[in-house]
Amino acid sequence: MQSEPTEKLIRGVGVTGATTLNMIDMIGVGPFITMPLIIAAMGGPQAMIGWIAGAVLCMCDGLVWAELGASMPKSGGPYNYLKEIYGPNRLGRLMSFLFIWQLTFSAPLSIASGGIGLSQYATYIFPSMGTATKLSVPILGTVEINSFPIIFVAVGVLGIAVFLLYRRITIIEKMSKFFWIVVIATILWVIFAGISNFDPKLAFDFPPGAFELKPEFFYGLGAALLVAVYDYWGYYNVNFFAGEVKEPEKTIPRAIIYSILLVAAIYIVMNISILGVIPWREFSAVAETDAQKYVVSAMMERLYGPTAGVIATVLIIFTAFASVFSLLLGYSRVPYAAALDGNYFKIFSKLHPVHRFPYISLLTMGAIAAVFCFFRLADVIAAMVVIRILVQFVAQIVGLMILRKTRPEMPRPFKMWLYPVPAVCALVGFLYVMFMRKGFLVQVKYAAVLIVTGVIIYLVRSYKRKEFPFGSQIVTNEII
């Protein structure tokens, strides 16, 4: 196995920096625009179950990331984990390639979702930006495409984020702390507005049969969990740039656990406080309309006037930008790690000659994400979540249990609490999210096609290079 030349990277991110980068990745624009979707899915304020269950699920999975990240603290995260777990000269070669293959789609989808969400939220101030239009595309069928102004703003946001990330990691850590302050200040203002005008009769106005355990409840919970998981995801961002983290065996687990606990508390308190101001039926009614995009700004306008609504919108837009910034930072490090190992294009292994960061990978991720900015936000979120669960999360969770059995002597600076309970809960939870939803087959088919295509590409390439399963040769730093 080729070791990562960590001396070329700068280990400049501590616990505070890693936690803030995780948090600004997690928060973004998601919780501000997806609240009506979760309430509509659950049919009332019992939607809080979705937020709580999502936090528990992500904490269980976070412990998987914490153990693997502390044991293998290299940039690229899951690429290294899957390769080691399943054998660097055997199945691990295929698994790590499939991870990079799906990341080519899921990472830009995730980054693009932040840019699209930001643009859509800006329609509160500039309603003339327009809405999505339907186009008929061969093979794909009818596809909704965002309006040109929304696409233009989303792509512009990505360009600004790439520009700010085009510098030394120690400077980026300082920038992330500034972003974190603004993000938390925005959240606290929203929470204060809700609590100071809180009406418990509105917040806990449960409809008849709200907690009746019937099929509709479980399907609703599945749909709510899909959105909640999307809003929580990002707690593992530190694993992707682990090669630039100080004392990673301590920093990685702490950053993951701290960020999940803090963001879960923020989401739950914020949602309860908002439900105490705006009736849940009003949220549910706008779930499939343009008003869903800026319900928080509408609440601020209702409480404090139009100016407050505009200020809230600007702050939320900044929060969304901070998330795009953090996502691009983390994901741009993965192709770099794969290229070092000969499992991706050699050009991605290049570091900036002065500031020592993978600039080719950063620019490429930003460019691909810009393409996905053309598509509707809901479609981007659903496709990203299902693809990532199928190709990455399930394999990684099962892999941790395999590694515990096959490599008991492996150094583990951090061990999962109550093993294997969290791992099993995470596995069951993610499978539930995938299949307990109406219309889940559409995204599963997309993911299946992606996997089959990736396997075919890998087999053709490995046949030419005499790698697993056609040989044992490992080619490093060569173009695929």
Image (cartoon, rainbow, N blue to C red):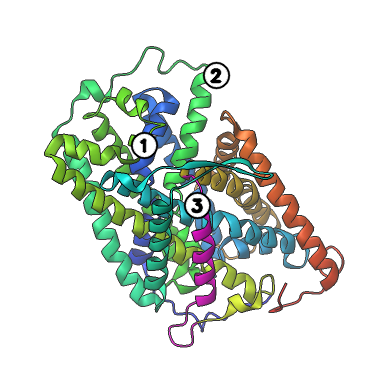
Tell me the kind of residue under disc 2: Pro
Q: Earlier in the sequence, mark 3 or mark 2?
A: 2
Please report contact status of discs 3 and 1: CB closer than 8 Å, yes or no: no
**Left or right of residue 352, residue 100 in this image:** right
Q: Earlier in the sequence, mark 3 or mark 1?
A: 1
Q: Quadrant of residue 305?
A: top left
Q: Is 356 colored magenta in this rendering?
A: yes
Quadrant of image for the C terminus: bottom right
Residue under label 3, please give it. Answer: 374
Residue under label 1, please give it. Answer: 290
Which span of residues is magenta-colored?
Answer: 352-376
**Left or right of residue 289, residue 270 in this image:** left
Give the residue drawn at x 48%, y 68%: 241
Q: Quadrant of residue 100?
A: bottom right
For disc 1, the neighbor class at 10 Å (few under 14, some 14 to 19, many from 20) is some
Q: Position of residue 360 (x, y in %)?
A: 54, 75
Tell me the kind of residue under disc 3: Phe
Numbered tag placed on residue 215 in the rendering: 2
Toward the bottom, the furthest residue is: 353
Q: Position of residue 81 (x, y in %)?
A: 62, 61
Please report contact status of discs 3 and 2: CB closer than 8 Å, yes or no: no
**Left or right of residue 465, residue 408 in this image:** left
Front-lying residue, 418 or 96? 96
Q: Secondary structure at mark 3?
A: loop
Give the residue drawn at x 48%, y 36%: 225
Give the residue drawn at x 36%, y 26%: 284
